[in-house]
Amino acid sequence: MNEKDSNKSITRHSFAMSIPTLASRLLGLVRVKLEASVLGAGEYAAAWYWALSIPSLFRRTLGEGALSGALIPLLAEIEREKGREETRQNLAVVFAVLGIVLALIVVITSGLAMLLFHLQLDLGQEWNSPRVQLGLRLVPILMPYAFFMCLVGVIGAVLNYARVFMLPAAGALLLNIFMISTLSAIQWGNLSHGDMQDALEWLGWSVIMSGMVQFVLMYLALAHYKHAPIFRKLKKNVGIIKRLWTLMIPGVIGGTAVQLSFFVDRTIAIKVGAQAVPSLSFVDRIIDIPIGLFAVSMGAVLMASMSRSAAKGDIAKMSSELVYSLRHVMFVCIPIAVAVIVFHRTFIWLICVGGKYAETDVKAANAVAIFYGLGLPLFCTMKIISPMFLARKKVIPPLIATSCAVTLNIILDLLSLCDNIIPVGNMKQGWIALATVISSVLNISILLCLLRKEGIFFGGKQVLTTAARTILALLPGTALVILLGGCEFVSGAPWMTQFARCAGFGALFVSAYLAVVWIFKFPEFRELFGALFGRNARE
């Protein structure tokens, strides 16, 4: 496959992977709408999102990423050398050891939360606030979710190794389905009878149920494809645990650092004020849509393609794919970032306002949306650069870059607690979002410097040219929208009126951008169009 066909293949496969992701993200928006309506943007929402971030930390660190990435090549090696049955026996050891470790984590974390809840330590007014105490009460309920989802992550890795991809992706829909059902029942008054603490506990149980059901279904799928672990022949084989740990430890350290930074963000935000955590969480869900649809999908395709090129020692092809992907990230993600900044008030209003989430709560998320919007191209760029290192099994450089970025992020987060540096008000949660953006700049800069040091071409001038050209192409549409008042929402207007108004101005914004792109014949537009609708794509 030549370079041109390889780049087209990356685009086509990325967009194909975006389809199930889109379904999950759209369902997630329904869930966000209900969460905002039921929980609002105050004490209850802050307690819920903070408590949920704790099991999510363990899920993302142990159940996803490093563990899955290390397990797949290890299973392939064992099956090639010793056969399927030996692989399943070794998998049983992994399940047993991981299950014990996870059970201990659940018990210790839950016990610590219960101890802090009952001791009622005098840690200051903010830390003893109702949102913190309610969050500590919810942690023991939510922690078993981490147990099930970490095991689901392992099963998903094994299924991917068995060339089964759709089932793990479809399983992610279950959490949204269970939470939407529970939130709907709470809103209609069938659960909790107006007691919000009971409502949050019901919501916590729905999260656990989604994890249990997903685990059972995934394990049945594993058995169906003849890859289930053989526990009846469980043996003391610590060799696979040592090898697995050696492969995954750099990724675990990096993943832990990232999740620790995320947890510090939310923990500091819960001290900043009741509206801070919901503001960060709701805007994060909006930003996560383009990241998942474009950057995550392209990053996954790049990882597979670059791994094959790395095995052949074809660094030139890897560089070509990197430059192509970075240019298209700029071409697609910069317009989305500008749209988020221009329309952020309307987006938040449409998705969140209703029930207990009032129009006044939109103001609390303004600065967060602007800074997260500015950082969107950076967040997407990280997904594209990382495969260049991981495909060559260079796990230490990303670990160094991540550690430096996380350290900077935590230091900047702590500044939000200083009233003489960051003014009291909505800017505090905005500063937390800005800290994430600044740390992403550092992370990307370190990785690009390391690539330059290795002599690997990443097309800096080409990528910057695409970015500058894209920004200039956006100026006419942005100016039209601002001049016509499209960046504001009409207070008190019905939801459909707001939606129609946003859709109209959004169409104007996109049309103006595409018109400039077409008139000046941007190469990225021709490449995307050719990859998706050209003759090879139809075939």
Image: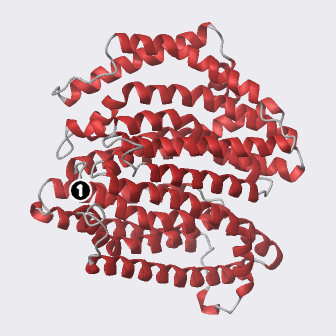
Q: Residues within 10 Å of mark 1 (few under 14, many from 20)?
A: many
Residue drawn 43% across and 67% down? Answer: 55
Q: Nearer the viewer, residue 369 or 25?
A: 369
Q: Is residue 431 above or below residue 78?
A: above
Q: Is residue 430 above or below residue 74?
A: above
Q: Quadrant of residue 222?
A: bottom right
Q: Residue furthest front?
A: 420
The kind of secondary structure element at disc 1 is helix
Q: Nearer the viewer, residue 385 or 193?
A: 385
The residue that label 1 is drawn on is 43
Going by the image, does 13 lie left or right of 178? right
From where the camera sits, is residue 28 visible? no
Q: Residue furthest right?
A: 313
Going by the image, does 181 lie left or right of 451? left
Q: Quadrant of the C terminus?
A: top right
Q: Where residue 16 sits: x, y (%)?
A: 58, 40
Going by the image, does 182 lie left or right of 213? left
Q: Amino acid at mark 1?
A: Glu
Q: Where residue 31 sits: x, y (%)?
A: 32, 49
Q: Residue furthest top?
A: 519
Residue drawn 65% across and 48% down? Answer: 300
Going by the image, does 423 lie left or right of 61? left
Residue drawn 64% across and 91% down? Answer: 234
Q: Quadrant of the N terminus?
A: top right
Q: Nearer the viewer, residue 149 or 356?
A: 356
From where the camera sits, is residue 446 visible? yes
Q: Where residue 538 sits: x, y (%)?
A: 64, 29
